[in-house]
Image: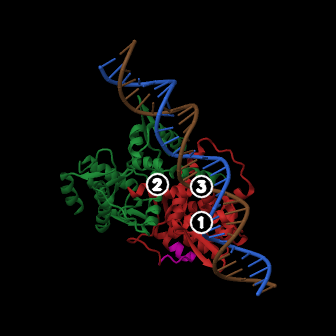
Chain colours: A green, B red, C blue, D brown
Amino acid sequence: MPTTSALAETAALIGEPARAGMLLALMDGRALTAGELARVAGVTPQTASGHLGRLAAAGLLSVHCQGRHHYHRLASASVARMLESLMAVSESAAAQPRRAVVTGPRDRAMRAARTCYDHLAGQLGVTLADSLVERGHIELSSEGGAVTNAGLAFFGEFGLDLAAAPRSGKRLFCRPCLDWSERRLHVGGMLGAALADRCFALNWIRRAEGSRTVVVTPAGELGFRASFGF
Amino acid sequence: MPTTSALAETAALIGEPARAGMLLALMDGRALTAGELARVAGVTPQTASGHLGRLAAAGLLSVHCQGRHHYHRLASASVARMLESLMAVSESAAAQPRRAVVTGPRDRAMRAARTCYDHLAGQLGVTLADSLVERGHIELSSEGGAVTNAGLAFFGEFGLDLAAAPRSGKRLFCRPCLDWSERRLHVGGMLGAALADRCFALNWIRRAEGSRTVVVTPAGELGFRASFGF
DNA sequence: AAATCACTTTGATCGCCGCCGAAGCATTAC
DNA sequence: GTAATGCTTCGGCGGCGATCAAAGTGATTT
């Protein structure tokens, strides 16, 4: 059977601290150079090079060479989703023997708000999702999510171009994504990506230097309160 | 950071051919004994015991002791989903250097129809999903899926008890699940599980001995044609 | 009670893989 | 041109972990 070995190979590839760290660092959806990833993983460049070569060969990463820099990014959203589901399982498992971890300031910022490949996660993402549900703009459960008719109008007003989004029938789906720090659902998929993009464009949020963490700007404080009530 | 190490540990656990084989064998959602899993994985019982202990400790498996038999099953549907997404990524990656595999008769039966944890997959699952979409009973895309109002009535008539299903708002979601053999979507989630249960109850399909494979009975041939038009 | 069966624990062996140092190849800077 | 930077390839070291044999535990059978 081909599938069993393919599965094991892929999992083994991820199941290595250095490689896992690299993949996790790329979960913000942006491209990083080999050197940056080496530093993130805590290994020398030559070791990182080997890892990156194998990850790319397995189709988990896509590489883009520009001069002497080699930019690596996750190959697709499906890779990000796979990693996310793996994290969800790992976290829930690790939660039983209550992992005693000192959460540094960096962790705290990450838990407050971060990107999850192409959409918002952390407390910000979860609060945003809660607000949207409460106001009847979307419906969300672990099984799935969808934009309501009222929501469709709201998002249009907010400046999202959802016309181009692929939808089956008349519904527009928003993929629920389990947040590993909050253990609650937030909005992923097409809608989540569009929302995050718009917030970046409005300068409501800004990426922290070289991290998945995002920070809410003063304009964002006002904007989120005005548009989403928090 | 705790998450990176937890992720790597879990992935490493899966990234071992023997353990991966065991997990895959449990993808039909049923419980197997330690001995059966040892045979599936092609290792001695004592080796399997070690593997199973680690998988259970990590929260991937749940164990149920009955006399001198120890029954193991996947700990939850989220574990199955995680494995499924891992397979999807592995397959697509392996497809690039077109894997030359001789598909035996067993593989062929598996591709025709099998269970994917708690719902139907393979050609049968995909055809079923296509039929449901075409007839307007459900809507399905890679982002999500939902039951239409027409579908709600149809499934009620078909004998599914969907009242107990958790739903947010008024919608009932059906989770899309990417089929690794067909590369198309089939119906998972609550609805997929209910559909599969009902088909088993109607004796339309039957599990093959010790395998994920399911076979369509003569009654099923008629039933699928009458109710779903194929 | 003795024998058998299913499973686990322990101990020892061995192969694989991650790691870094050194060297090689590009590209950019001066 | 020379030097510096970013990345890769090669070679050898070292450790983790998968494996099985043998022995131990507990349940079922005769």
Magenta-drawn segment: B153-163
Residue A86 is situated, as x and y percent measured from the top left of the image, at 48, 58
Q: How many marks?
A: 3
Chain holding disc 1: B
Which amino acid type corresponds to the residue marked 3 in the rendered image?
Answer: Glu
Tell me, yes or no, whether dots 3 and 2 are on the same chain: no
Say which mark, if any, is on residue B52.
Answer: 1
Q: Nearer the viewer, mark 3 or mark 2?
A: 3
Spatial CA distance of label 3 from label 1 is: 12 Å
User: On screen, B131 above or below A73?
Assistant: below
Rendering coords of residue B187 (x, y %):
54, 63
**Foreground: A188 or A15?**
A15
Query: Regarding mark 3 in the picture, which secondary structure is present there?
Result: loop
Which chain does the residue under circle 3 lie in? B
Residue B114 seen in the figure: no
Does the magenta run of residues contain A46? no
Q: Is residue A65 visible?
A: yes
What is the distance, in whole Å, between disc 1 and disc 2 at their CAs? 23 Å
Q: Is residue B192 above or below residue A12?
A: below
Which dot marks residue B16? 3
**Residue drawn at 54 percent across, 63 percent down:** B80
x, y percent for residue A59: 53, 44
Give the distance between the C-alpha atoms of the residues marked 3 and 2, in whole angstroms.
18 Å
Amino acid carrying mark 2 in the image: Leu
Q: Nearer the viewer, mark 1 or mark 2?
A: 1
Residue under mark 2: which chain is it in? A
Q: Are marks 1 and 2 on the same chain?
A: no
CB contact under 8 Å: marks 1 and 2: no
Q: Quadrant of the N terminus of chain A?
A: bottom right
Which quadrant, please, contains the C terminus of chain A?
bottom left
Packing grade of label 2 (10 A; few <14, some 14-19, many >=20) is many
Which residue is tagged 2?
A: A83
